[in-house]
Image (cartoon, rainbow, N blue to C red):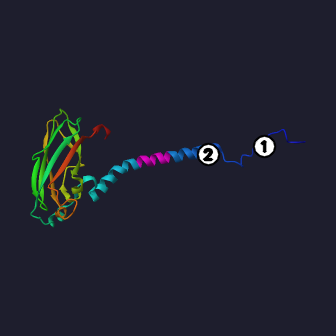
Amino acid sequence: MSDQGNPPKHNPQSSPARPNNNVKTALMAGAIAISMVGVGFAAVPLYQIFCQVTGFGGTTMRVDEAKAAIVKASGKKIYVRFDANQRSDLPWEFKPENPVEQTVIGQKDMAIFTAKNLAARPVTGIATFNVTPTQAGKYFNKIQCFCFNEQTLKAGEEVRMPVLYYVDPKILTDPDTKDIEEITLSYTFFPVDQSEK
């Protein structure tokens, strides 16, 4: 008897099962998606660390009291302008006590910002900052700062927030910064959605 008219018999061991391939593909796609979300969340703090270490994009440097104590004042002065902003949906009044100060390069100085909650309820905000001109960022050293820390103000509450800083004397020997006469330190406060916590 001839098998020419009959279709070939299917041998289940000769080809992999389709459902297993689909499950593996779906698991792989899911793992990639979860990894991408993780990378997305990690990108912000990693970028922040990169900027703080390098001074990239006008990001200031963070130093401790011990390192600040060994810096020698140069005797040369520079103007530091303080800029305060808040996003329109943050019901605060935010401003520097003194918009411009003249400071000795290498000497510790303090600027005070004030924030007042204009709402009838507690509101939480968080600040970001930058320095211009951007090439001066790596020489603007903050010892103490309120940035990247959530600040919760009660209804009508007003607070004073200090920034302790110095300008590194190396700014005077860098060809890109030696002629800078004024640095602007700018803060922007954003609301923090407490319902997500």
Q: Is residue 105 left or right of residue 175?
A: left
Residue at image mark 1? 9
Residue 45's tag is: none
Packing grade of label 1 (10 A; few <14, some 14-19, many >=20) is: few
Report the residue at 45% width, 49% height from top. 35
Q: CA distance from mark 2 to mark 1?
A: 22 Å
Residue at image mark 2? 20
Secondary structure of the residue carrying tag 2 is helix
Say which of 81 and 52 sits in front: 81
Report the residue at 19% width, 49% height from top. 146
Say which of 147 and 20 sits in front: 147
Q: Quick one: quadrant of the N terminus? A: top right
Report the residue at 44% width, 47% height from top. 36
Q: Earlier in the sequence, mark 2 or mark 1?
A: 1
Q: Main secondary structure of the magenta part?
A: helix
Q: Is residue 187 left or right of residue 3?
A: left
Choose top left, top right, bottom left or bottom right for residue 8. top right
Callout 2–callout 1 Cβ contact below 8 Å: no
